[in-house]
Amino acid sequence: MLDLARDTTPRTIADPLPDASGAPAVLVIDDDPVHRMVLCKTSERAGLVPTAAGSFGAAISLLRRNAYAAITLDLSLGTRNGLDVLHALAGMRCRTPIVIVSGTSAGMRTEMASLAGLMQLDVRRTMAKPVDLALLRHELTAIRHESEPTAQRLTA
């Protein structure tokens, strides 16, 4: 396993990084700028504040500094891949819900989700590209609701 994380503090949905409005944040990890933009817009429509990472290095740097309510992960990241990110997340003891959104085969997405489960990561769903935006928005909205304090949910 890659030992890339120095901070071993678990990252959970209990401590997502909110913006000034109080909305929880999502980390969108995808090396394709068009897909990143679409995923960020969909995240906004789900009530999350997106932070985009276009590479493995950018994603790990952001994860070391911030906590997120959700992560979307592409499995193809140029010279690195989603498995590298999953190993790094496991090394950080990350408990943030993950949605895999990838153009890889259904078998590969399922295998990565199974491996993530063995690493005690919380992969909620895998989705093919081009992604069903309504389904992604629904999944991210559900994760956002989980991350909100109970009092905030009752007043919404």
Image: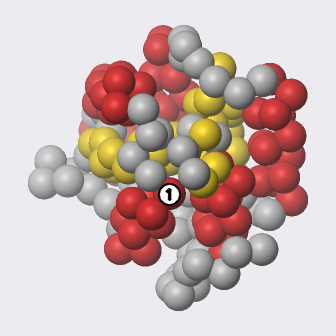
Q: Where is residue 135 in the image (x, y as percent from the top left)?
A: 55, 16
Q: Is residue 43 visible from the viewing direction of this image?
A: no
Residue at figure coordinates x 57%, y 51% from the top left: 79
Q: Picture quarter containing residue 38?
A: top left
Residue under numbered circle 1? 56
Disc 1 is placed on an element classified as helix
Mark 1 crowd level (few <14, some 14–19, many ≥20, 10 Å Cα): many
Residue extending furthest left? Answer: 20
In the image, 120 versus 129, the foreground residue is 129
Residue 8 vs 127, above or below: the answer is: below
Residue at figure coordinates x 54%, y 45% from the top left: 78
Q: Picture quarter containing residue 85?
A: bottom right
Residue at figure coordinates x 64%, y 24% from the top left: 103
Residue at figure coordinates x 60%, y 46% from the top left: 98
Q: Position of residue 18 (x, y in %)?
A: 27, 56
In the image, 129 versus 68, the foreground residue is 129
Q: Where is residue 55 in the image (x, y as percent from the top left)?
A: 44, 52
Q: Picture quarter containing residue 59?
A: bottom left
Name the residue type under label 1.
Answer: Phe
Q: Where is residue 48 in the image (x, y as percent from the top left)?
A: 32, 39
Q: Is residue 113 visible from the viewing direction of this image?
A: yes
Is residue 116 shown left or right of residue 88?
right
Is residue 11 shown left or right of residue 64?
right
